[in-house]
Image (cartoon, rainbow, N blue to C red):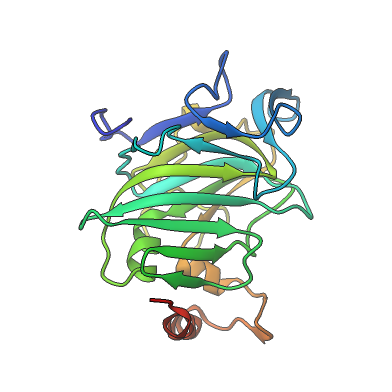
Amino acid sequence: MFKNEYQGGAFVEIFSAQGKNPGAKWKIFGGPSVIWKEFDKEVKSFVFILEGSSQTNRIQLPKENKQILGLIQRFLVLQIYIPLGQDFSTELLITDLGNIKRRLYLSTVHKELSSTPLHAKIPLFMIKRKIWCNLCIDLVAFTSEIFKGAVFQSLDGIIVSANCKLRKIFTLKSKPQETADKDDEPTDMIPRSCQLTTDVPHITQLLNMTKICQTEIKFGGHRIRSAESVLKDFFETCELKKIF
């Protein structure tokens, strides 16, 4: 869908809730009582709302499994609002340089990281709720660190499941400035046309393996320690959990 389009700019827009029929290119699983578009007074723009079961109520791009997105930029951003006490999931179809397709399944349902050679379940215990969030997923980092030796080539499919409000989805060439970000890596601003207005409370949150490990939570009965030590434990555990 995007393979032959120009992707050398700062971003590529994949979805916007604005316009007459923003869901036209998406396959929608769930009726209008659980997935609908409405004007959100807080953000002063239209949003897509997905409610109910995260297992059944979802939207998928592209519609047909034979199609591919062909998105090559490193970062995927979901501009999203996730309510308290509700599950949320997103599934990403990744193709690596060996043309092997792999799936990343990120969900609040998962309590631990697990993987097979073609599929990974990634917990979203650190995700910010009850605030608008530019949820930024580092596709390159997840691909290489979970699937040892794999190199990200393209994002070829997206599924967004309940429960959330969704305003935009886009890719970024450069890492965005994260809220309270203190590292020394080069960052860029969220493109102006994708930004929420300044009077809307919002954050930008980067997701990669290091960020998951840095979050201080109870994980399997043990408190997460430094990123370096936990990454080592994470991958040692993953090796034991792999199913071939």
Q: Describe residue 74's horizontal placement relative to residue 132 as left or right.
A: left
11 vs 101: above or below: above
Return the residue nearer the eye: 138 or 61.
61
156 or 216, which is in the foreground? 156
The residue closer to the viewer here, 133 or 177, is 133
The picture quadrant where one finds residue 56 is top right
Quadrant of the drawing holding the N terminus: top left
Left or right, residue 229 beside residue 150: right
Query: From the viewer's perspective, is residue 1 above or below residue 207?
Result: above
Q: Residue at x 48, y 84 (%)?
A: 237
**Quadrant (top left, top right, bottom left, bottom right) of the C terminus:** bottom left
Question: Residue placed at 52% from the left, 53% from the top?
Answer: 178
- What is the tally of numbered marks visible in this picture? 0
- Residue furthest to the right: 85
Q: Is residue 54 visible?
A: yes
Residue 201 x, y percent position in the rendering = 69, 41
**Would residue 136 appear left or right of 74 to someone viewing this image?**
right
- The residue sitting at 31% across, 72% down in the picture is 148
The picture places residue 150, in percent across and down from the top left corner, at: 27, 65
